[in-house]
Image: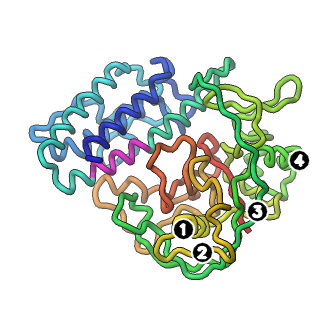
């Protein structure tokens, strides 16, 4: 696929995600960690204008000078920023102006692509498209959180939510351990935090064959899991007590005691077979302790993934190949690991403002692996390092056990 086709496809998908929403929906912000859809659409456009047009376009002029501040996220090297928690106050520009902004920048990028772009321009375009795909996932997670604040339980999607097939019995897949090469392995796109590829010792371990289900997590709740401090990390138990947590985010009981879960399809009866999601690291870790298990390290997760799609240096499990046994590595929900988000040995930030993309967040965060039902097609890969604070619950985050 040509860069022009790839660019057009990603940009159109962002607008498509906004189609089911009203302008009022697109301007709402339900909490400081979330952003309005209108802001996501403008910020991803700001990225191309700031890091590509400003550098490569002859006679560059901004679409609107104020947008440089309004739609900057966290790039201190670029200049001032509008406060993150106040993005819903940006009633102006209107949605129609944001769409015009996108169309203007897209036309100008198209002219650059028609003029035999160089390698550096293509590299930055690839980064910008991957960045926009990240925001496409955030659009869905932020919209879900916003709609969940409404007592009408409005659905983002009008279509019915299909039921999940029965979950296979949980099995433990053994891996022999040894030296493994970890990190991105080829010349395809990756973020800088996936590099450099390096060798790491992994002790023998076993990984659960699938993700934890709603039914299994409900059993944890009914067994008093949210009332037993011995299962919880200290900070997690403080969070349980402070916020009076007793179940995952989006779960609730009706007047008859039946459990329901709010989804992008609206409020639905809890599907016991569906992977449990919107769990914090604290909840994932407590459940793992209750199951006499633990969370995998990110190296263990990548080793197991290599057994499904072998790469150079990948380790394979003891005994039978697990290709038909390891399920839901991608496409269901992001999987918490016990690994803190830290640089790989030899990691170096990119120069300039783009160096702020990943490196400066390597503190007080944990790594998640895989991808979720909200991840755009083609965006996931085995070396991808997603990261969030331990208390984050509004993302599609779930649990795969290890021993």
Residue at position x 84%, y 58% from top? 230
Q: Which mark is residue 316?
A: 2
Number of other residues with Cα within 10 Å of mark 1, as a class: few under 14, some 14 to 19, many 20 or more: many
The span from disc 1 to disc 3 (Cα, nearest Å) is 18 Å
Q: Which mark is residue 236?
A: none
Question: Residue 94, position in %: x, y?
Answer: 37, 19
- Judge whether residue 71 can be spotted in this image: no
Question: Residue 220, position in %: x, y?
Answer: 84, 49
Q: Secondary structure at mark 3?
A: loop
Q: How is the image coloured?
A: rainbow
Reading the image, the residue beneath label 1 is 306
- Judge whether residue 283 can be spotted in this image: yes
Q: Which residues, given as a range, are shown in magenta?
A: 124-133
Q: Secondary structure at mark 4?
A: loop
Report which quarter residue 359 is drawn in. bottom left
Q: Is residue 378 magenta?
A: no
Question: Residue 295, position in %: x, y?
Answer: 69, 62
The answer to which of 292 and 66 lies nearer the viewer is 292
The span from disc 2 to disc 1 (Cα, nearest Å) is 7 Å
Q: Examine the residues drawn in magenta and state their main secondary structure.
A: helix
Q: Are marks 3 and 4 in contact (CB under 8 Å)?
A: no
Q: Which mark is residue 171?
A: 3
The span from disc 2 to disc 4 (Cα, nearest Å) is 38 Å
Q: Secondary structure at mark 1?
A: helix
Report which quarter residue 242 is drawn in. top right
Side of 154 relative to 260 (left or right):
left
Residue at position x 26%, y 46% from top? 3
Residue at position x 25%, y 42% from top? 4
* Camera-side mark, 2 or 4: 2
Q: Is residue 165 above or below residue 202?
A: above
Number of other residues with Cα within 10 Å of mark 3, as a class: few under 14, some 14 to 19, many 20 or more: few
């Amino acid at each position: 696929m040509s860069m022009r086709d790839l660019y057009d496809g990603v940009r159109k998908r962002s607008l498509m995600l906004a189609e089911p929403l009203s302008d009022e929906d697109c301007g709402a912000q339900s909490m400081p960690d979330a952003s309005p859809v209108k802001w996501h659409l403008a910020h991803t456009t700001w990225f191309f204008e700031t890091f590509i047009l400003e550098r490569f376009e002859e006679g560059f002029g901004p679409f609107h000078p104020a947008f440089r501040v309004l739609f900057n996220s966290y790039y201190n090297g670029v200049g001032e920023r509008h406060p993150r928690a106040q993005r819903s106050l940006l009633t102006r520009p209107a949605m129609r102006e944001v769409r015009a902004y996108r169309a203007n920048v897209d036309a100008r990028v198209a002219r650059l692509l028609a003029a035999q772009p160089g390698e550096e321009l293509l590299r930055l375009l690839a980064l910008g498209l991957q960045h926009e795909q990240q925001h496409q996932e955030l659009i869905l997670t932020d919209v879900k959180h916003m709609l969940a604040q409404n007592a009408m339980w409005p659905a983002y999607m009008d279509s019915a939510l299909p039921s999940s097939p029965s979950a296979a019995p949980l099995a433990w897949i053994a891996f022999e351990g040894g030296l493994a090469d970890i990190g991105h392995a080829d010349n395809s796109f990756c973020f800088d935090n996936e590099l450099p590829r390096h060798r790491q010792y992994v002790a023998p371990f076993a990984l659960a064959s699938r993700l934890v289900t709603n039914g299994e997590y409900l059993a944890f709740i009914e067994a008093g899991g949210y009332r037993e401090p011995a299962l919880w990390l200290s900070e997690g138990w403080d969070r349980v007590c402070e916020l009076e947590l007793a179940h995952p985010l989006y779960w609730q009981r009706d007047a008859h005691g039946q459990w329901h879960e709010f989804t992008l399809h609206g409020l639905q009866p809890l599907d016991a077979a569906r992977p449990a999601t919107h769990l914090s690291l604290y909840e994932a870790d407590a459940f793992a302790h209750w199951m006499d298990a633990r969370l995998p390290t990110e190296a263990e997760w990548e080793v197991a993934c290599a057994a499904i799609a072998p790469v150079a240096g990948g380790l394979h499990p003891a005994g039978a190949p697990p290709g038909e046994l390891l399920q839901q590595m991608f496409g269901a929900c992001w999987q918490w690991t016990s690994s803190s988000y830290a640089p790989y040995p030899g990691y170096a930030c990119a120069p300039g403002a783009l160096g702020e993309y990943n490196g400066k967040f390597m503190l007080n965060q944990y790594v998640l692996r895989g991808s979720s039902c909200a991840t755009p097609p083609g965006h996931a890969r085995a070396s991808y390092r997603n990261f969030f604070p331990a208390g984050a619950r509004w993302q599609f985050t779930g649990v795969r056990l290890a021993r």
